[in-house]
Amino acid sequence: MSTFRVITNKNPVHALLYLIVSLIAVAMTFFSLGAPFAGVLEVIAYAGAIMVLFVFVVMMLNLGPESVQQERTWLKPGIWAGPVFLAGMLLFELLYVLFSSDSGAAIGTTTVSPKAVGVSLFGPYLLVVELASMLLLAAAVTAFHLGRTEAKE
């Protein structure tokens, strides 16, 4: 549901909140499949990095005082109801999975070690990792060019 709201939401700040909830849901899927390292990487790299990049873009664009007034109207308590509800459902699901059995069998009996992740990323998936790094570099260059003062004039 939150991924659908990311696509259909017209407000970029609200779409970002729903995107973070969606990424946390993917991380919880990794946790439930027995890959806690991948789940932690999902939260740190994607949910954390996307928030930082969004803040940097807002800072580079420097929208001015009219955007402050517009943000005040966006930050009403009713706006947060959707993301808070979905995050609460995810928290309930995580607690249910963690505490439903004594042995933790609902989570999975095998875990993926960081060494196995590294061997996979720099082994058969090396090309995909390099392509993702090029995509991130292109996004950083694009954000820099959008934020230049000469481009605004």
Image (cartoon, grey):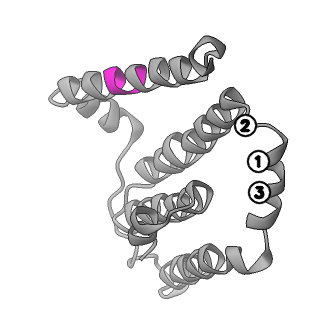
Q: Quadrant of residue 110?
A: bottom left
Q: Nearer the viewer, residue 35 or 21?
A: 21
User: Residue 88 at what x, y percent from top left?
Assistant: 62, 80
Label 3: few (<14), some or many (≥20) within 10 Å? Answer: few
The reply to whether the magenta stretch includes residue 67 is no
What residue would you read off at disc 3? Answer: 70
- Examine the rendered structure and indicate whether residue 94 appears above or below residue 50: below
What residue would you read off at disc 2? Answer: 63
Q: Which amino acid does label 1 sit on?
A: Ser
| Main secondary-structure element of the magenta-colored stretch | helix
Q: What residue type is labelled 2?
A: Leu
The reply to whether the magenta stretch includes residue 135 is yes
Q: Which amino acid does label 3 sit on?
A: Gln
- Examine the rendered structure and indicate whether residue 16 appears above or below residue 117: below
Label 2: few (<14), some or many (≥20) within 10 Å? Answer: few
Quadrant where the image shows the N terminus: bottom left
- Examine the rendered structure and indicate whether residue 130 appears above or below residue 15: above
Determine contact: label 1, label 3, CB under 8 Å.
yes
- Secondary structure found at label 2: loop
Image label count: 3
- Secondary structure found at label 3: helix
From the viewer's perspective, is 37 left or right of 77? left
Q: What stretch is highlighted in magenta?
A: 133-137
Marks 2 and 3 sit apart, C-alpha to C-alpha, by: 11 Å
What residue would you read off at disc 1? Answer: 67
> Reading the chain from its start, which is encountered first: label 2 or label 3?
2
Q: Which of 47 and 91 is in front in this view?
A: 47
Q: Residue at coordinates 38% horizontally, 55% vertically from top-left? A: 35
Q: Residue at coordinates 67% horizontally, 26% vertically from top-left? A: 60
Quadrant where the image shows the C terminus: top right
User: Residue 129 at what x, y percent from top left?
Assistant: 28, 27
Residue 132, label in figure:
none
